[in-house]
Structure formats: structure tokens, C-alpha cells
Image (cartoon, rainbow, N blue to C red):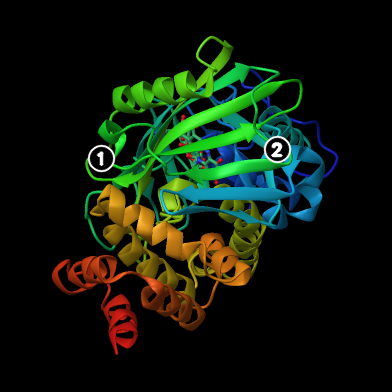
């Protein structure tokens, strides 16, 4: 690794203006400055690699309320959680359930600072531009940016989000979209139990709000605040922000919260079911760019936080032992082991089924889903089961569904032309 000498106690070089102290050829070039980019770039920097980080607005603050299950937060990041709830509630038109699984909201600002601090402790060059072209050479890649400059690195990690033009995918099916409109309210008498977040409440506020299905998501926060969000889980094309906003307003009216002071709003649009990266590419994708968004839930943070260090380490070990080709192979293998790709394919089937469900089918589906054992629910939502265990959970779920929803799934599996493996899961369930 030619430029690994730029490490150790050298002065931190992460300021955009501090260009003079940087070596020409860096070990790693990271595209993006979202959670995926900073997590993997800081993991590389911690290992002593020199990093060029290319992003149009590298310092712009992250705004989303990033949440995940408490058991998915890596130990070293546990101080960066802002709030936790010991229980969650999931409600449909058919009933409501409370699950004893802790859910946490990350302190977004603290998380972003944490990654920048780790980057600052290493040798990092920040290029405040968009990457417009990658030219892959036998032992390096040149990143061309929109100011006309070129930056040479050994390995590119593309964490520039779901719209990246640089990643080839195994299929080009258009993504479905999870869309959501949220409001942070100052509402000390909001009426929600502070010990319980509402993961989903599918009960529509009126008959007119039944189709397409959407649900209320609620985070009761400290200081008398509450975050409420109307979410469409997965639709192709996406449910519009205007519709979600109107539904949220109607819910606030019925909850007596329409006049609460509004502190912030959130617009959320997440591409779901992007094709996984095709094998044999001259870069390592990461985060949404790598198709890591959970295809059936839209969650991504836990996968980013869990995978950043192993992917970074595999790339750097590969560079040390066998050069760029070895680094690319090792990085991509650590990112998407074969079993994990199969798991994502099965979830892809689940996504296709969800996208086409009516409001009443969605309610029945989730009513059955939350009757699964806590372990099965957690395993399915977490995305860390083996293919056979996931197949088993889906078969159990299938058997518990009412016939109308079963047939919807069978049609999706047989007509939709999605993962053959998922079809065999369904066939087991039909028997
Ligand atoms: C409002 C909202 C709330 C969410 N909440 C949750 C949640 O609670 N839990 C969860 O698990 N997930 C959540 N997600 C989903 C997911 O975690 C986020 O979308 C996450 O931000 C994706 O991270 P990323 O770094 O892969 O991509 P992004 O955050 O999209 O970052 C992409 C980066 O690449 C940069 N970029 C773009 N083009 C170029 C280019 N040509 N060259 C260089 N850089 C470029 C962008 O400027 C940006 O910095 C949420 C998403 C949204 C939108």
C-alpha cells in the first residue's frame, strides 16, 4: 500500500481547505458523506489508511431521525443514542400488540461528529465536489470531480447513495419507494406512553385513508416533544408527500394535536429493492449504493454500522496482501457473502408482495406477522437470518395468513418472476 506511510501521529488533514499536506495516491477514495460514507471512511482511517472523501456538501448536517433496534447498536456507539424505548407497539385494524424489544433513536448530530472525529485522527483529504467519472486503471482509480480535478486512489468505495451511476446491478427492476412525512411537535400533553414507541399503526383515520395503505409512526421524546410520521411502507410508484401530509394532518386533528407547535419536519424517500451489485466490479459499493437497504422494511443503519469495519478491514488486508484486485475481491465478499445475497433475494420477494397489497391485505398481513414469536419477528426485521431460517419464518408466516393474502403471495411468486427460492418457500407453505 504505497501511501500508507501517511498515518500515525501526523497532523489531522480533514479540513477541506487543508489540501497541501496530502499525498497524491491515496489508499481509499470514498464517494459520499452520508452515514455509509462516514462509517466506512472512518473505519479505514482508524486502520491507518489514507482516505480521499469526495462529496458535494461534506459538512452538511444529517437531518433524519435515525432509529434502530437497541440490540443492533454496536458497543462502541452505545453512547451515541439519544433516546430508547423498552417496548414497541404495532397496531392494525385487527388488533394491537406490544413487543418487549428495545428501540433506540441515535443522536444524529453526535453520530456525525463521532465519525468526523475518527476521520480527523487519520490522514484524510476532503474534496467538496461531486464525482462525475471513475477511470479504473490496473492498480488505481482516478476520480474526476465536477471542478475538473482528478484524484487518484487505489480502491474506490462508492457510498454516494441509491442513485449512484457507478454501480452495476444484477437486475434493473425499478425500485419501490418508502415515503414518509414527519413532524416534530412540542406537545407536552401528547398522550402517548413515553416508554413505548409506535412502530406502525395501520388503523386509517377515515375510510378515505384506506388506500393506498399507510401507517402512523410515533417517537415520544424527552422534553415534551413527540415525532409523528405518516409512512407508506413500499409502493411503486411512490405515494406522494402531499397525500401523506394530508393524512398526518387528519391524524393530528383526531389526536387533538393539530395546534401543537411544529419544531421540524422530515421528508423521507427510500429506494427499496435495488438490484444487488453485480460481481466483478472495479469498486466496492457501500450503504444504499450497495443495495443494503432492507428490502422489506427500509432500514439500513444497523447494516451500515455492523458492516463498515469488516468491509474496511477486508479491503485494507487485501491491499496489503495482494494489491488492488485482492482488495476489491475481499471487500465485495465481506459486503455481500453468498448466503446474505440469497437472504436479500427472499426479502425481495416479500417486497414485491407488499407493493401490490391492498389496505385490508396489508392489515391482515401485519396482524399475522406480529403474531410470530418475538425471535422470529426480530430475526425477520433484522435481516440477519440464514436463508433456511428466513425461509422457515416466511413459511410459518404464510401458514398463519388468511387465504386471500396467501393467494396474493402465491400470485406474486408465480407470476411476478421473482426469486425462485421464494417460490419454493411458498410452495412448502401451501402443502
Ligand atoms: C428521512 C429519512 C429517515 C430515515 N430513517 C431511517 C431510520 O430510522 N433507520 C434506518 O435504518 N434507516 C433510515 N433511513 C434510511 C437510510 O438509513 C438513509 O437513507 C441513509 O441516509 C442512507 O445512507 P447512505 O450513506 O447510504 O446514503 P445517503 O445518506 O443518501 O448519502 C449519499 C451521499 O452521497 C453524496 N453524493 C451523491 N452523489 C454524489 C457524487 N456524484 N459524488 C460524491 N458524492 C455524492 C450525497 O451528497 C450524500 O452525502 C432513513 C432515510 C431517510 C431519507
On screen, residue 424 versus residue 57, left or right, reads left
On screen, residue 123 versus residue 291, left or right, reads right
Residue tagged 2: 115
Residue 167 on image: x %, y %: 34, 51
Label 1: few (<14), some (14–19) or many (≥20) C-alpha neighbours in 10 Å: few
The residue at the point 28 percent across, 65 percent down is 405
The residue at the point 32 percent across, 43 percent down is 213
The quadrant of the rendering that contains the C terminus is bottom left
Q: Is residue 90 above or below residue 244?
A: below
In this view, which residue lies farthest toward the right?
Answer: 9
Q: Nearer the viewer, mark 1 or mark 2?
A: 1
Seen from the viewer's position, the closer of residues 264 and 276 is: 264
> Residue 379: which numbered mark, if any?
none
Element on which disc 2 rests: helix
The quadrant of the rendering that contains the N terminus is bottom right
Is any part of residue 146 visible from this angle? no
In this view, which residue lies farthest toward the bottom?
Answer: 431
Residue 20 on image: x %, y %: 65, 24
The number of callouts visible is: 2
Residue tagged 1: 211
On screen, residue 405 versus residue 128, left or right, reads left
Q: Is mark 2 within 8 Å of ligand 1?
A: no
On screen, residue 78 versus residue 208, left or right, reads right
Amino acid at each position: 500500500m504505497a501511501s500508507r506511510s501517511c498515518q500515525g501521529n501526523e497532523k489531522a488533514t480533514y479540513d477541506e481547505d487543508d489540501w497541501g499536506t496530502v499525498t497524491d495516491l491515496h489508499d481509499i477514495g470514498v464517494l459520499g458523506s452520508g452515514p455509509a460514507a462516514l462509517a466506512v471512511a472512518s473505519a479505514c482511517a482508524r486502520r491507518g489508511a489514507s482516505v480521499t472523501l469526495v462529496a458535494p456538501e461534506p459538512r452538511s448536517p444529517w437531518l433524519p431521525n435515525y432509529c434502530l433496534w437497541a440490540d443492533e447498536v454496536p458497543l462502541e456507539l452505545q453512547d451515541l443514542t439519544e433516546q430508547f424505548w423498552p417496548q414497541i407497539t404495532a397496531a392494525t385494524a385487527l388488533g394491537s400488540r406490544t413487543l418487549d424489544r428495545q428501540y433506540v433513536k441515535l443522536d444524529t448530530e453526535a453520530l456525525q461528529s463521532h465519525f468526523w472525529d475518527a476521520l480527523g485522527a487519520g490522514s484524510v483529504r476532503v474534496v467538496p465536489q461531486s464525482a462525475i467519472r471513475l477511470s479504473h486503471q490496473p492498480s488505481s482509480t482516478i476520480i474526476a470531480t465536477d471542478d475538473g480535478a482528478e484524484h487518484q486512489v487505489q480502491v474506490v468505495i462508492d457510498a454516494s447513495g441509491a442513485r449512484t451511476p457507478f454501480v452495476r446491478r444484477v437486475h434493473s427492476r425499478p425500485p419501490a419507494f418508502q415515503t414518509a412525512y414527519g413532524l416534530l411537535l412540542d406537545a407536552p400533553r401528547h398522550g402517548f406512553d413515553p416508554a413505548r414507541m409506535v412502530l406502525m399503526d395501520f388503523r386509517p383515520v377515515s375510510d378515505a385513508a384506506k388506500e393506498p395503505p399507510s401507517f402512523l409512526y410515533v417517537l415520544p421524546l424527552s422534553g415534551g416533544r413527540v415525532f409523528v410520521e405518516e409512512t407508506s411502507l413500499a409502493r411503486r410508484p411512490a405515494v406522494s408527500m402531499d397525500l401523506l401530509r394530508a393524512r398526518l394532518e387528519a391524524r393530528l386533528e383526531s389526536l387533538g394535536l393539530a395546534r401543537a407547535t411544529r419544531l421540524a419536519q422530515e421528508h423521507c424517500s427510500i429506494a427499496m429493492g435495488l438490484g444487488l451489485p453485480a460481481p466483478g466490479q472495479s469498486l466496492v459499493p457501500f450503504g444504499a449504493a450497495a443495495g443494503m437497504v432492507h428490502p422489506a422494511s427500509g432500514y439500513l443503519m444497523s447494516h451500515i454500522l455492523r458492516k463498515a469495519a469488516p468491509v474496511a478491514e477486508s479491503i485494507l488486508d487485501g491491499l496489503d496482501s495482494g494489491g488492488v484486485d485482492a482488495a476489491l475481491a475481499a471487500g465485495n465478499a465481506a459486503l455481500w457473502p453468498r448466503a446474505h445475497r440469497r437472504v436479500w433475494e427472499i426479502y425481495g420477494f416479500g417486497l414485491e408482495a407488499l407493493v401490490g397489497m391492498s389496505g385490508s391485505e396489508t392489515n391482515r398481513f401485519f396482524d399475522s406477522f406480529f403474531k410470530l414469536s418475538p425471535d422470529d419477528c426480530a430475526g425477520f426485521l433484522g435481516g440477519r437470518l440464514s436463508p433456511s431460517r428466513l425461509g422457515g419464518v416466511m413459511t410459518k408466516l404464510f401458514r398463519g395468513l388468511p387465504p386471500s393474502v396467501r393467494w396474493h403471495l402465491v400470485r406474486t411468486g408465480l407470476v411476478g418472476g421473482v426469486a425462485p427460492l421464494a417460490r419454493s418457500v411458498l410452495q412448502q407453505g401451501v402443502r
